[in-house]
Image (cartoon, rainbow, N blue to C red):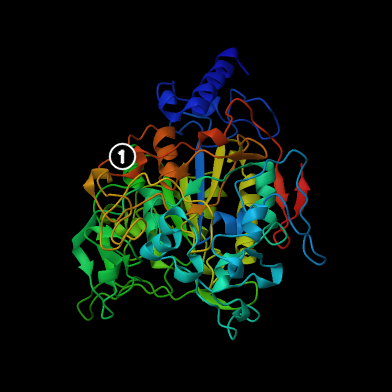
Amino acid sequence: MSNTARKRISRNALALTLSVQVALAIMPFTASAASPNPQSNDAPEASSDPQSKAAPETMTPINHVVVIFQENESFDHYFGTYPHATNPPGEPPFNARPGTPEVNGLSRKLLTANPNGSANLPFRLDRSQNYTCDMNHGYTAEQQAFDTGLMDMFPRFTASACSGLVFPGLASYGTRIVMGYYDGNTLTALWNYAQRFAMSDAFHGTNFGPSTLGAINLVSGMTGKVDRAHTVQGPGGGLARDVVGDSLVGDPGPYYDDCTYPDRTALLGKNVGDLLNAKRISWGWFQGGFTPSTPYAEKTDASPATPAKCQTTTARIDGKAILAYAPHHEPFQYYKSTANPHHLPPASDNEIGHDGSANHQYDLTDFWKAADTGALPAVSFLKASAAQDGHPGNSSPLDEQSFLIATINRLEALPEWGSTLVIIAWDDSDGWYDHVAGPIVNSSKSAADALTAEHQCGTGADSLAGIQARCGYGPRLPLLIISGYSKENFVDSTVTDQSSITRFIEYNWDLGAIGEGSFDAIAGPLTNMLDFAHFHPTLLLLDPKTGALKVRQ
């Protein structure tokens, strides 16, 4: 590697470690100078990336970001006892590497004298209890569970007792179920990824509340620009609970989607897709079940247009069929500029990631059509089918593990792996217990708020752009950063949130900011989990069934 390229890497690594703001002044990387060979510790002058000649300049060695966006887990629910696993007979063992850092997790005191009371102590869910019911993760309920930061009202406000008919063996826990957690004998893959790569124990939902908010905050940091002209109230009247003022607080369906729900709405303003389009950078949202089971039919002289239908199912590991596509998990369908209302396919495989009939919204299978032919988009958001997204009630940690391992093993085999950053994040906490109350960086005073007093989450005086009903940061969520540039076996305690992912994408491709009240303006950086001066070529391939090490080379 030339001295010029080596100095470029060192200069960027130092600045990025200090802060994103300092790094903005650094000369951007080119694809040819920043795509290391996975089998070497050096970054060669000639990239192994087949798209390197056409790839836009980036501010780091990362030419490809893949965000895997999963469902409904709090940090303590997944990593509360990391790196200590129980290792009972019959479950895949997990033994931490020497020197593994501790996390801000469930201490001995929290396990034996929890503020939720002696009848509601946190407890371990074993591998056979991988299917649980869904907790209450409403915007208001989560604030009530936090109880001004005392974190002592989870069984009262966010618990949902699991039916014994649907979830055998869990009914006896009652509302205490919300205090349950898994360890590395069930979450073997995620704990192994944390051992080899980097994780955060201070990553939060941008706001309190459910899936739609997390998905929107991932791509725009802005849930407060509801388009009232494109808002439809269904017969159940749920929209009145989902929208407060001009802010989303619930899960209405996306207006620009044939497969949506009766209660549906749209959003105004920009998202990160708009910023990527402005720079002509390839990107896409790829979701399981997006290809319609019944395609859209255009209007003819003989019949009206027929909307697309999304009734495809996928099987869980226990064989149960689950409807694959969840409309409110697809954030770009809320924006007219980035929606594909009729779920149209790309005109050709060459269109994937670029402007065309699909408008950057695709089925998950389209991602692999592009990736396997050397056309990996610069930015990709992957959303599993509902059976594999980890959401309690329709999925499980083991279903999720199968999807994550299959995806990451396959990504590691691509020529572009050396310039790829994988982010595994979750949309909300599902209401599961977590003992950490994050900082309230954006307060709110609306009818839906209840953290510090009735109708209050802070004073509301410091709300971004003055928009209420967006209180945050919300509950703590897991986050893993997987790349050859990840700090190995590292736990980061920098306070970050879902819009930090948008901020990294904005920075890396010099897109500018969304602004106008977006959380991207105050988001913490992800770069403390990365070291761009050192590339680690070792691959970590895991067994999809056990999560244990399969091949290390």
Q: Given the current orientation, which residue lies at the most extreme top position?
A: 3
Residue 141 placement (x, y as % from top left) = 40, 65
Give the position of the C terminus as an image quadrant: top right
Give the position of the N terminus as an image quadrant: top right
Observer-nearest of 451 and 2: 451
Quick check: 56 left or right of 243? right
Identity of the amino acid at label 1?
A: Ala
Residue 462 placement (x, y as % from top left) = 27, 43
Which residue has dot 1 on it? 278
The image quarter containing residue 80 is: bottom right
Q: Residue at x 65, y 62 (%)?
A: 182
Observer-nearest of 188 and 140: 140
320 relative to 34, above or below: below
Residue 344 visible to an observer of this rendering = no
Observer-nearest of 174 and 17: 174
Residue 82 placement (x, y as % from top left) = 67, 51
280 relative to 400, above or below: above
The image quarter containing residue 13 is: top right
Residue 59 visible to an observer of this rendering = yes
- Total residue callouts: 1
Q: Given the current orientation, which residue lies at the most extreme right position?
A: 89
